[in-house]
Amino acid sequence: ATPRSSALDVPATGNLLLMPAMGIYKIPTGIKGPIPKGSVGLLLRHSSLTSKGVQDLMGIIGEGYEGEISIMMKTEYPYQIIKGDCIAQLLLLPYITTSKSHMKRTGEFGITGKQVYWQTFVPDSERPTLSVYINNKQFSGLVDTGADVSIISKKHWPISWPLTDVLIMLTGIGTMQNIQKSTNILNCSGPEQQPATLQPLAADIPINLGG
């Protein structure tokens, strides 16, 4: 952006190949809130990308949001993003407060909890897999899928492990219903017996996903 620009350029923080079959990408920007007090941020598409078949999904950044700003993008044709490329523009506008709420927000896209993004259509030869033990039971699944949290297929979920209903949207294949979360925090260990804990989701998906 130049001193006379009306909006701020948002650069890519790394290289990324966008593919049409992968659906919507969530791209981190390295920019964190909050934005200046008394303003609202509009994430706008960059005209140079639109002409190449790449679309930014416009969004609003509220004054109270303190997490990292991400850009939602999809493409009609394969497109290579290079680190430093301008992938969107952030326009700051003044707004009038209509609520006395001072709650801080770190959740993205209108919610304060996590959203789960699953990008499908991964060729068999390129699927990275991993086996872990959760409460002494072995689970195998995909890793580096774009999921923000770990998701276990309900067909693999032990009946004795209690579940709790949660309000989480799974995107990338449309909105999926009947998503639940482990009531308990579970112990797990990786291939090299590294100890850890997690509280995975359970959903009606054909495979397990590691986040």
Image (cartoon, helix red, strand yellow):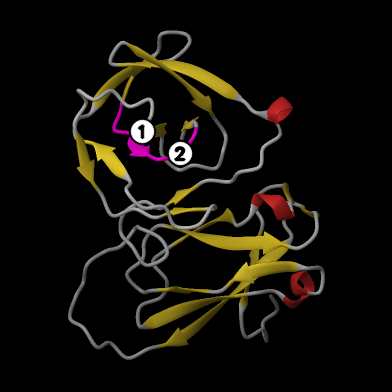
Of pointers 1 and 2, the one earlier in the residue sequence: 1
Counting every numbered tag in the picture gives: 2
Of residues 207 and 185, which is closer to you in this image? Answer: 207
Of residues 78 and 194, which is closer to you in this image? Answer: 78
Residue range highlighted in magenta: 198-206
Percent coordinates x, y for residue 195 in the rendering? 34, 15
Q: Tag 1: residue type? A: Lys
Residue 186 is inside the magenta segment: no
Crowding at label 2, few (<14), some or many (≥20) Cα neighbours within 10 Å? some
Of residues 151 and 144, which is closer to you in this image? Answer: 151
Residue at image x 41%, y 64%?
Answer: 33
Left of 161 or right of it: where is 189?
right
Q: Tag 2: residue type? A: Ile
Q: Which residue is mark 2?
A: 205
Residue at image x 34%, y 53%?
Answer: 168
Percent coordinates x, y for residue 155 in the rendering? 38, 29
Percent coordinates x, y for residue 95 in the rendering? 37, 89
Residue at image x 70%, y 51%?
Answer: 21
Crowding at label 1, few (<14), some or many (≥20) Cα neighbours within 10 Å? some
Which image quarter: residue 199?
Answer: top left
Left of 92 or right of it: where is 119?
right
Q: Is residue 22 above or below residue 41?
A: above
Residue 199 is inside the magenta segment: yes
3D distance between C-alphas at marks 1 and 2: 7 Å
Residue at image x 53%, y 20%?
Answer: 130
Q: Is residue 116 above or below residue 126?
A: below
Of residues 16 and 32, which is closer to you in this image? Answer: 16
